[in-house]
Image (cartoon, helix red, strand yellow):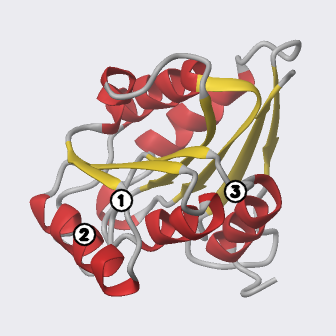
Amino acid sequence: MENLNTLGMVHEFLRRSVVPGAFCIDATAGRGRDTALLCRLAGEGGRVLSFDIQEEAVRQTRALLEGEGLRAEVILDSHAHMERYAPEGRVDCVVFNLGRLPGGDPHIFTRAESSLAAIDAGLRLLRPGGVMAIALYYGKENGYEEKDAVLEHVKTLDDRRYSVLVCHWANRKNDPPLPIFIWKEG
């Protein structure tokens, strides 16, 4: 595993789950690193959509992809609107980094209302056997409201349709981000 942290766990999960030709969504583009990874994993035959509400995040993601010779549809829109861009039941993988853009404006961050709507939209878009990975950052400026809402929400998902694994770091200090993995049953 690249790094024994939340992002490293999510990336390892993606490497094991995303195959060439996959249709993937990066619901929170940020600096574009997850989008680039999805592009490499899905390959030339795949399709990647990437969303962010911040123009700077969209710009940085596009620049990273161009610099690496990768392509994705990078969309300036809320992750809660992803169903406008993809057909239901056709997506192989959806990835979220909930919280704020590292190094960005600390007062701009994801919020429970739109994130829960986006998670539900992503689950509807997933094909049977599809996966979702969430890196849940919390604390500091964005507080705990979104974390608490997401953790409560994933508990309510129908266990006949979804398997949900929520991990926490037992010995890490200062609000370490939580990895959440969801499998849509086939």
Q: Residues within 10 Å of mark 3 (few under 14, many from 20)?
A: some
Question: Which part of the image, by quadrant, shows the N terminus?
Answer: bottom right
Horizontal side of 27 relative to 124 (left or right) equals: left
Q: Secondary structure at mark 3?
A: loop
Q: Residues within 10 Å of mark 2 (few under 14, many from 20)?
A: many
Amino acid at dot 1: Ala
Residue carrying label 3: 20
Circle on res. 77: none
Q: Residues within 10 Å of mark 1 (few under 14, many from 20)?
A: many
Amino acid at dot 2: Arg
Distance of mark 1 from mark 3, alpha carbons? 21 Å
Horizontal side of 102 relative to 34 (left or right) equals: left
Residue 71 versus residue 159 in the image, above or below: below
Counting residues from the start of the chain, the first of labels 2 and 3 encountered is: 3
Distance of mark 1 from mark 2, alpha carbons? 10 Å
State if disc 3 and disc 1 touch (CB < 8 Å): no
Amino acid at dot 3: Pro
Q: Secondary structure at mark 2?
A: helix
In percent of width and height, residue 131 lies at 72, 40
Residue placed at 54% from the left, 39% from the top? Answer: 148
Residue nearest the viewer, comparing 7 with 38: 38
Circle on res. 62: 2
Residue carrying label 1: 29
User: Which image quarter: residue 77?
Assistant: top left
In percent of width and height, residue 21 lies at 65, 49
In percent of width and height, residue 175 lies at 57, 68
Counting residues from the start of the chain, the first of labels 1 and 2 encountered is: 1
Give the number of the mark in front: 1 or 3.
3
